[in-house]
Amino acid sequence: MTQQDLPLVSVICLCYRHEKFVEEALASVLGQTYPNIEMIIVDDHSPDKSAAVIKKFLQQQESSRYPIKTVFLTENIGNCRAFNQGFALAEGSYIIDFAADDIMLPHRVEQQVRLLEQLPATYGVVFTEAAYIDDKGQHLYYHYQDRFRRMKQQGIPVGDVYVEVLQQYFICSPTMMIRKRVLDDLGGYDEKLTYEDFDFWVRSSRKYWYDYLPECTTKVRQLSDSLSKQVSKPGDKQQYSTYLVCKKALVLNQTRPAQRALVKRIQYELRQSLRTGHRREAKLFLHLLCQLQGPVNLYNFLYKLTGFHMKPAILRFFSKGKLNFF
């Protein structure tokens, strides 16, 4: 099979303050064994020297076997909007959302394309094992082998994973390869959100199936100032984005298992909001629980959560927005 016969894969490399890592990340894309890739680099107006490092790297790649497209944004617009800027340029049948501080292992694209080409059209996403590394590139742990060891022993959810993604986090999003038509159907990422993966999992898995490739394909870098580390800080907007996704799920749900899974998710996020001092979000999650379970069940949950006795009548008053509890 010639290169022209192989499906094109668009790797959208998102860079923001990745000056120290972006060259290695881009080199890992160009070092893939798969011959039919286009690389789309989007720098989200990094305040460091990321853009200069990217331009210098590209000057050294004039003879690259892969076509390379670039977007250097003149203002910081956030991860979801920046990805959509790159996605608008994508021509591939398959898409990879690739952070410019991570590293692709050489056979990643080849392995994932091979699997997706064998799967029925109902499958829209393939995800894999990943190795987490620190800022110096030193190994920390594996996603499933270490962090989700029990899940690997019992079986990683595949196929229709809608209920599972509502209930718990288990997919390593940096390892995903996505059929382009899935993102076309969704209209790309929701630009109202601060982060993308939970919303993408919920909306895409409602219609498309997922499969797991038991190979480590990606080194995912964990940094102290990464977006996921900011959620506990005052003013961080990720918890509100999670609330918006849960509101979407409330509309998308069609089965009792899905409703039960959403209840568990909201209860978890409520605890997180209270723990991190996000009072507005805690109040919003409480309202969602009222819609799902009613004020009496909400009272029981709050009693267990806080240890305080609160009369159901007070909670009914609160659920109608008339009591500023937080």
Image (spheres, grey):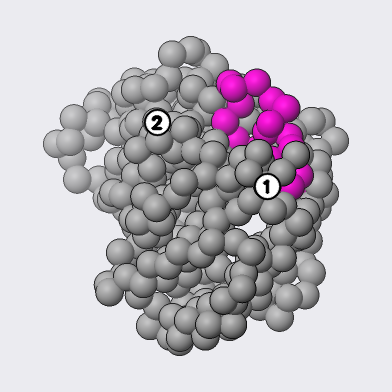
Decide which of tag 2 and tag 1 comes sooner along the chain: 1
| Part of the protein shown in magenta | 110-131
At 40% across and 78% down in the image, what residue appears?
Answer: 46
Residue 244, above or below 71: above
* Rendering coords of residue 302 (x, y %): 42, 36
Q: Residue 3 carries which label?
A: 1
The amino acid at mark 1 is Gln
Please identify the residue farthest to the top as the structure is shown.
255
Q: Residues within 10 Å of mark 2 (few under 14, many from 20)?
A: few
* Residue 266 among those drawn in magenta: no
User: Residue 102 falls in which quadrant of the image?
Assistant: bottom right
* Rendering coords of residue 63 (x, y %): 61, 73
Q: Is residue 281 left or right of residue 125?
A: left
At 27% across and 74% down in the image, what residue appears?
Answer: 74
Which of label 2 and label 1 is nearer to you? 1
Of residues 240 and 48, the one nearer the viewer is 48
Instruction: State which quarter of the image contains the N terminus.
Output: top right
* Residue 122 among those drawn in magenta: yes
Of residues 142 and 61, the one nearer the viewer is 61
Mark 1 lies on a secondary structure that is helix
Residue that badge 2 annotates: 185
Of residues 225 and 263, the one nearer the viewer is 225
Q: Residue 297 carries which label?
A: none
* Rendering coords of residue 84 (x, y %): 37, 52
Please identify the residue farthest to the right as the structure is shown.
153
Of residues 124 and 151, the one nearer the viewer is 124
Mark 2 lies on a secondary structure that is helix
